[in-house]
Image (spheres, rainbow, N blue to C red):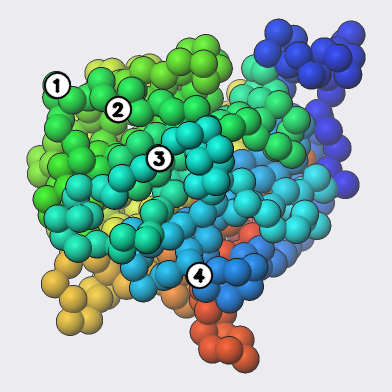
């Protein structure tokens, strides 16, 4: 059982219920004194289990993993449940999740956390997205919930959860009971309306994957927006961030990071990380011919973004990636940042006019220099594999939640798999906590 982190002295059950007023003493990365013997072991180990399996639970397909470790150490795993996979991102989609209180060893049964019934109960109705209508995407009876994005709040103990509906409206929920339940959705589309003067979007999306909390307490969410005139209604596109400095009560926009074609072509799904010096790094998916991931830096996560540059070690087949920190040098003697994505930019999709490469060979990487170079690379899933998210447990165990394919008696089905491993596995015994 993964131990819970200690509460601040004097925090009672009532104080926990009022967590917004009484912060927890929480940690962004593993505490050296709390690391488990297994996580520190020099003997490599890896454990995997499929949490969402296509054809089970009422959904032919599951996609878009989201992973977060709560301030108390519980693990929340989110995924799209897709009713009609042939319609892709514009099909009927709901957000499913499972919860673990023992570090990802055992899990609660699958349940729904976001569905249109929650909005309907509040009298919220939706129209189909104009960009989808113009291109004949989706269907009149289909309405996607898209881009779920959790954030663990180390200052209050809450779990924040953002999502969009129909790529045109954004909503916010929160949990005050360690991810057992979430509040009804509250609309925050107004934060995207703040971009209108700079970018007249028709399509909006948060994340996906997870958002982050800076040392200052700021909640930070990478977002992308599209004018909706191009392929699949998702192109051309730009990226930015939205943020909250009051633990999710209000949201504001940051600066647009880069345009639609210069220096990146159609930048979109992006992950964020706070660096040791307090700056924020965005790691950006895009469709440029270089086929390398791009990064941009900001002193505060919302302004003064640097011109994006390519990272040669990180292949870009055009796919969402995972990013998180394992250790800071100050506490553990060495900076370690983790990255995951399909390490393949040499095989274009056959007979396909896009810039996409085959999504396979999902790999884990480590940077020891705050994301500049990535000398460690190890394959986790050699076959077809795509989106992934990363997290670190309080005891130092590494977690990767990722899409792959599995052969079943019913045929090949999409699954979302949860992997637990130690640093020694990733480095073939060359590094350990």
Q: CA distance from mark 1 to mark 2?
A: 11 Å
Callout 2: 10 Å neighbours few (<14), some, many (20+)? many
- Asked if the residues shown at circle 4 and circle 1 are in contact, with their CB atoms under 8 angstroms apart, the answer is no
Q: Secondary structure at mark 4?
A: strand
Nearer the N terminus, badge 4 or badge 3?
Answer: 4
- Residue found at the very far bottom of the displayed protein: 409
Mark 4–mark 3 Cα distance, whole angstroms, equals: 26 Å
Which one is closest to the eye, mark 3 or mark 1?
A: 3
Q: Which residue is at a point 23% across and 74% down the rendered structure image?
A: 348
Which residue shows up at 36% across the image and 17% down it? 252
Q: Residue 125, labelled with which disc?
A: 3
Closer to the N terminus: mark 3 or mark 1? 3
Under circle 3, the secondary element is loop
- The nearer-to-camera label among 2 and 3 is 3
In space, the residues marked 3 and 1 are separated at their CA atoms by: 26 Å
Q: Which mark is residue 309?
A: none
Q: Disc 4 vs disc 3: Cβ atoms closer than 8 Å?
A: no
Which mark is on residue 197? 1
On the image, numbered disc 4 is attached to which residue?
61
**What residue is rendered at 77% in x and 54% in y?**
108
* Residue 207, position as x, y percentages in the image: 41, 41
Choose the circle earlier in sequence order: 2 or 3: 3
């Amino acid at each position: 059982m993964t131990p819970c982190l200690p509460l601040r002295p004097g925090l009672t059950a009532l104080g926990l219920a009022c967590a917004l007023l009484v912060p927890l003493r929480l940690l962004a990365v593993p505490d050296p004194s709390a690391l488990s013997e297994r996580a520190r072991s020099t003997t490599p180990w890896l454990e995997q289990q499929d949490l969402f399996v296509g054809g089970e639970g009422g959904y032919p397909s599951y996609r878009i993993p989201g992973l977060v470790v709560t301030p108390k150490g519980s693990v929340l795993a989110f995924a799209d449940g897709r009713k009609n996979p042939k319609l892709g991102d514009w099909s009927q989609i709901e957000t499913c999740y499972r919860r673990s209180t023992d570090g990802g060893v055992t899990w609660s049964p699958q349940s729904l956390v976001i569905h249109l019934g929650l909005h309907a109960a509040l009298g919220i109705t939706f129209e189909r997205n104009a960009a989808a209508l113009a291109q004949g995407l989706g269907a009149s009876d289909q309405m996607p919930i898209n881009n779920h994005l959790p954030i663990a709040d180390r200052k209050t103990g809450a779990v924040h959860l953002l999502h969009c509906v129909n790529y045109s409206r954004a909503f916010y929920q929160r949990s005050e009971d360690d991810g057992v339940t979430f509040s009804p959705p509250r609309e925050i589309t107004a934060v995207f309306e703040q971009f209108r003067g700079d970018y007249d979007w028709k399509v909006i999306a948060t994340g996906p994957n997870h958002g982050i909390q800076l040392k200052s307490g700021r909640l930070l969410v990478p977002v992308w927006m599209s004018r909706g005139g191009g392929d699949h209604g998702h192109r051309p596109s730009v990226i930015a961030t939205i943020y909250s400095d009051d633990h999710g009560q209000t949201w504001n926009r940051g600066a647009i990071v880069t345009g639609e074609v210069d220096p990146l072509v159609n930048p979109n799904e992006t992950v964020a990380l706070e660096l040791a010096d307090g700056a924020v790094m965005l790691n950006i998916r895009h469709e440029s011919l270089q086929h390398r991931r791009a990064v941009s830096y900001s002193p505060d996560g919302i302004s003064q973004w640097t011109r994006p540059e390519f990272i040669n070690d990180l292949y870009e087949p055009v796919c969402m990636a995972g990013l998180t920190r394992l250790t800071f040098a100050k506490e553990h003697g060495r900076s370690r940042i983790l990255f995951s994505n399909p390490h393949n930019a040499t095989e274009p999709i056959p007979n396909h006019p896009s810039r996409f490469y085959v999504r396979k060979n999902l790999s884990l990487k480590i940077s020891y220099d705050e994301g500049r170079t990535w000398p460690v690379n190890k394959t986790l899933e050699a076959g077809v594999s795509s989106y992934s998210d990363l997290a670190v447990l309080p005891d130092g165990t590494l977690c990767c939640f990722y899409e792959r394919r599995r052969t079943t008696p019913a045929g090949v089905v999409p699954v979302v798999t949860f992997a637990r491993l130690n640093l020694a596995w990733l480095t073939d015994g060359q590094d350990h906590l």
